[in-house]
Image (spheres, rainbow, N blue to C red):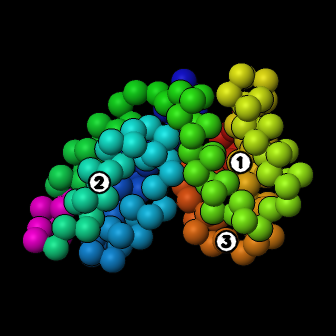
Amino acid sequence: MRKHFLTRIFAFSDLRELMNHATPSRLVEFHSKYKYLLMTYSQKNLKELGKIVADGNMSVNQKLSKYKMIFYQTFAKKSSRRRHANTLMHIMGHISKQLTRKEKEHLLSLIGKYSKGLIELKVITELLRSLSYRFENHYILIQKYLDPYPEELNV
């Protein structure tokens, strides 16, 4: 419950910051950073938000208005372990070709353990972050999913 609350607070704050300095490129950048966090809460809304960002017929203000409404709705309910596991699998897909067979098996095993409630999400996100550093995968490293709020609040 606490993690969900903190995730919402910081996501909404980031969105307000975007709205104060909005440009089409900043909206694209924002959406890219939030892709996997949005996926974890609602794949349907992620798709809808992506369509808004890509729509060439809307003004920036129209996009922001629609984007804001759906973005807020996306975080209305807490996500599930199943959705987190799905997101972790998608992130793993970005680096899987660079992993050894044993590394893939280990990561899949950890995701399975997380799904069953045997380990914390942070174990896997830290491993994915380390692997992303190793393979210089900047797209994964910018994801808000890995750091939805400041680490010092993880008390």
Nearest the viewer among 48 and 147 is 48
Measure the C-alpha gap from mark 1 to mark 3.
Answer: 14 Å
Mark 2–mark 1 CB contact (< 8 Å): no
Please identify the quarter of the rendering in which residue 114 is found.
Answer: top right
User: Where does residue 126 sit, x and y in percent of width and height?
Assistant: 76, 51
Residue 61 located within the stretch drawn in magenta: yes
State the residue position of label 2: 49
Query: What amino acid does circle 2 point to?
Result: Leu
State the residue position of label 1: 125
> Looking at the image, is mark 2 or mark 3 earlier in the sequence?
2
Measure the C-alpha gap from mark 2 to mark 1.
Answer: 24 Å
The residue stretch that appears in magenta: 57-64
Query: What amino acid does circle 1 point to?
Result: Thr
Q: Quadrant of the N terminus?
A: top right
Mark 1–mark 3 CB contact (< 8 Å): no
Q: Left or right of 54: which side holds 6?
A: right
- SS for tag 2? helix
State the residue position of label 3: 137
Question: Could you tell me if residue 5 is visible in this image?
Answer: yes
Main secondary-structure element of the magenta-colored stretch: helix
User: Where does residue 137 sit, x and y in percent of width and height?
Assistant: 67, 71
